[in-house]
Every structure is written in C-alpha cells, then in structure tokens.
Amino acid sequence: MTELSPIDNRVSTRAFKDTPVPQVLLNDIFTRAQQSPSNCNVQPWQTFVVSGAKKDALKQRFVEELMKGDGPKPDFDWSVKYAGIHRERQFGSANALYSAMGIEREDKNARQMAMLRNWEFFGAPHAAFFVMDKYLGIMGAVDIGIYAQTLALLLEEHGLGSCFQGALGQFPTPVREMFGLSDDQGILFGMSFGYPDEAAAVNAARTERATLSEAVTFIS
C-alpha cells in the first residue's frame, strides 16, 4: 500500500457488512485521528461512536422522527441552496448514486426509500457523530472537517469504508437525548462506517472530480 492509496481509494460507502470492528482497532484509529491539526490546537471535536443495541435504538428513534413529518431541525444552519456549477455537481452526484442502484429519476418512492437508508446508517455496525460547542462557529466546523477527513483516511487504511452524512445532524433530538448533550453543544454531522459490502450495487457509484486547472490557481 502506497502512502497516497487511502486518498486514491476512499469513496462514500453506502452498504456495509454486519460485522463489528474490533474495539482494539477502533481505539487505535481514533487515537491516531487525534493528530489532526486544528486552529490554535483547540481540538474542538467531541466524537460519539454508537454501536450495537444503542445504534439500533437510535435508528428506530430516527425513523419515528421522520414519520412525524415535521422536517429537519438541525443544530447548525444547513440551508445552503447550491447554484451554478455546484448545483450541476449535486445533480451529477445524485445521478451516479441512483444509477448505480438502478433507480429511475421518476421513481420517487424508490428514491425516498434510498434516502431513508441514511438514518438506518446504511446497515453499518457503527456510526460517529461529530459534536462541538456551538459558540465555535465556522472555525470549529473547519477543524472538525479536517478531523473527520483524517478519520476517514485512517479507516480506509484499515480496509474500512465510511460515508459522511449531513443527514445525521438534521434530526438532533434523539441523538441529544441518548448522548446527554448540553444546550451549548451541537451536532454538526455524522458518519456511518464499517466493512464495505463489496457485492452491493450502490457501492459501485462513483462521482467525478474537477480538473486541477478548475480547482487550483498557481500564482508566482
């Protein structure tokens, strides 16, 4: 395995084997993730990893919240509406995902069922929730993004798949209750992870990346 292979190989995994990751390996991965950089070394992340019966109970609570039909009530503002090239990429990502699953654009029921899988953790044995003090604002969010990326690459290094999910922060009430969060803390987003189900069609989905010239400007 080359040094860059976790970066090259990482994809969003949306189907997992029902095989828990050994606790000793989880301890090693999350310990190494503590080396992530952060502004002024404040290390704002508070990570909650839920597994087993607690994870199943949280999944059920999520489904109950969705059935209420009240809509998302996230701790942080997720109201961005993509425009221009960003909207094109959003549509491209959705097309790649639903095409891999064989779901037609007009099949709204199948798309809704696929969306529901977010709150079922895509069948993963573990889910991580990234929490921070609300007052930290955008700087805390930047630091947690760096930390989460480090974590995802460490998981990939050990043959584990992951999927970052803003959806896991959209209905915070069940999570707040289970983890005993204070009013000063907020759930930024979550991540399902475990051993990928290589046979699942959804895991064949691939998205495109912008070229170097589109993304980077070198000035000298």
Image (tube, helix red, strand yellow):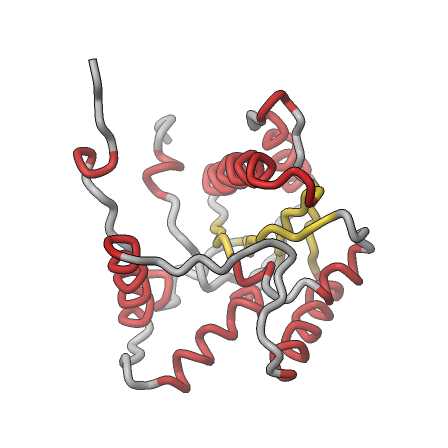
Q: In this view of the protein, can residue 206 be seen by the observer?
A: no
Q: Residue at x 35, y 30 (%)?
A: 4
- Name the side, left or right, on which 79 lies relative to 98: right
Residue 216 versus residue 126 in the image, above or below: above
Nearer to me, 19 or 190: 190
Q: Which residue is pictured at 46% across the width and 64% down the height?
A: 15
Location of residue 218 in the rendering, given as x and y in whole percent from the top left corner: 21, 22
The residue at the point 75 percent across, 59 percent down is: 176
**What is the x, y in percent for residue 131?**
67, 47
Residue 50 point in image, percent of width and height? 70, 56
Q: Residue furthest top?
A: 220
Front-most of residues 80 and 92: 80
- 8 above or below 160? above
Q: Residue at x 56, y 64 (%)?
A: 121
Q: Position of residue 132 (x, y in %)?
A: 68, 43
Horizontal side of residue 92 vs 186, given as left or right: left
